[in-house]
Image (tube, helix red, strand yellow):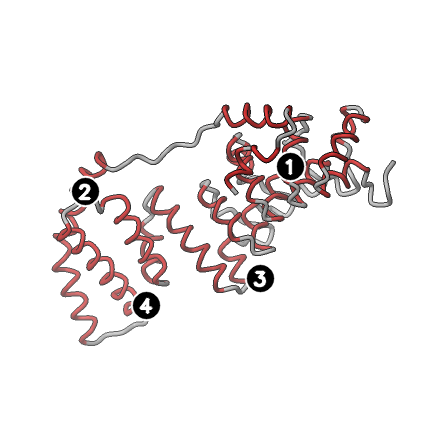
Amino acid sequence: MKDYQGLSSLHYASGSGEIETLKYLCEQSDEDALEVEDMAGMTPLMHAASKNSVICFIYLLFGRKANVRAKDKKGCNVVHWATYSGSLPILKLLDQIGILREFKDKQDDLNQTPLIKSFFNKNIAAMKLLIQANSNLYLRDYRGNTPEEFIQRYLPDQHLMEVFLKYKYRQFLESSVNFSEVRNGFQKNKVFVSEMIRFYYSKHGDVLPITLYGTLLALIVLTHVYYRYLAGGESNIIMLFLRFNMYLLMPVSVVLMILFYKAEIKAVPKKEWETDSSVIKQILRNIEDDDYNKIPVLKEI
């Protein structure tokens, strides 16, 4: 039986968080009932994700093997819905089993990625997780907006923008160098500069002499101030002073680049993503024992 919205009892139980009710209904239903869609095309698993019903989501996914790759009528998947609801436990779980990496850049019918969905309810924690998972920050929605442009045009929230830029620059610095992006970063704001300093300190601070590291910081700050004045069209004694100091430090920067190359060998390599099969086995054991409080992803939250 369904109501006027096409919702079955399984849909309601999945979103309510009532695990005992959900288990009873699943035991009384056939397997096809788990994939029944409401009028929006959402399955019970999607409802659990959209309502941040973590235990019900885990039970449906692992205990009943619900289809985690299904999409609703607007092209949204479980990662879209978990991000929209800000469910950090579900997103972390999907990351551990490989689904987040598979769906983090999937676009719905409006070409919106899960990252853009995180902006609607200002779910900053979900946004951080997606950027740290190396989500594509340059995919455009149906209006042609990148995630950064989406915040600027439709969600004028200074804190949200600052956090987004901070983690965007962290991803950028950890991945590859785009010199146009570097110049824009120096020119726009101090967030890029502070993140560049943090990046070099965390990666090379313990393997470079303090004098050379201090010289690098001076070069970074001077470059930022130089581009700020250059963008403003200034032409005065300050510009001459900045140019003189930058040209003076340029040979030092070449030496620093060589040292960074050597220091790269000593630096701790970034841990690559991998599926933790032991987590899945632990979850299955907890479901069999009805001991949901010991599920790894719930213990971390």
Alpha carbon separation for disc pair 2 and 4: 35 Å
Q: Which residue is mark 1?
A: 55
Q: Amino acid at mark 3?
A: Tyr
In the image, which is nearer the foreground, mark 4 or mark 3? 3
Quadrant of res 195: bottom left
Q: Looking at the picture, how far across and down is residue 142, in whole percent?
A: 60, 50
Say whether marks 1 and 4 touch (CB < 8 Å): no
Secondary element under disc 3, as helix, strand or loop, is helix
Q: Is residue 269 left or right of residue 207?
A: right
Which of marks 3 and 4 precedes in the sequence? Answer: 3
Vertical side of 247 occupied by 260: above or below: above
Alpha carbon separation for disc pair 4 and 3: 26 Å
Front residue (pair 14, 229): 14
Q: Which residue is mark 3?
A: 154
Q: Is residue 199 left or right of residue 113?
A: left
Q: Which residue is mark 4?
A: 231
Q: Looking at the picture, how far across and down is residue 30, in whole percent?
A: 79, 24
Which of marks 2 and 3 precedes in the sequence? Answer: 3
Alpha carbon separation for disc pair 2 and 1: 45 Å
Which of marks 3 and 1 precedes in the sequence? Answer: 1
Residue at horizontal 63 percent and vertical 33 percent from the top: 58
Q: Amino acid at mark 2?
A: Val
Q: Which residue is mark 2?
A: 207
Q: Amino acid at mark 1?
A: Ile
Which of marks 4 and 2 precedes in the sequence? Answer: 2
Residue at horizontal 81 percent and vertical 37 percent from the top: 9
Which disc is residue 195 wearing?
A: none
Q: Residues within 10 Å of mark 4 (few under 14, many from 20)?
A: few
Say whether marks 2 and 1 touch (CB < 8 Å): no
Secondary element under disc 1, as helix, strand or loop, is helix
Say whether marks 3 and 2 touch (CB < 8 Å): no
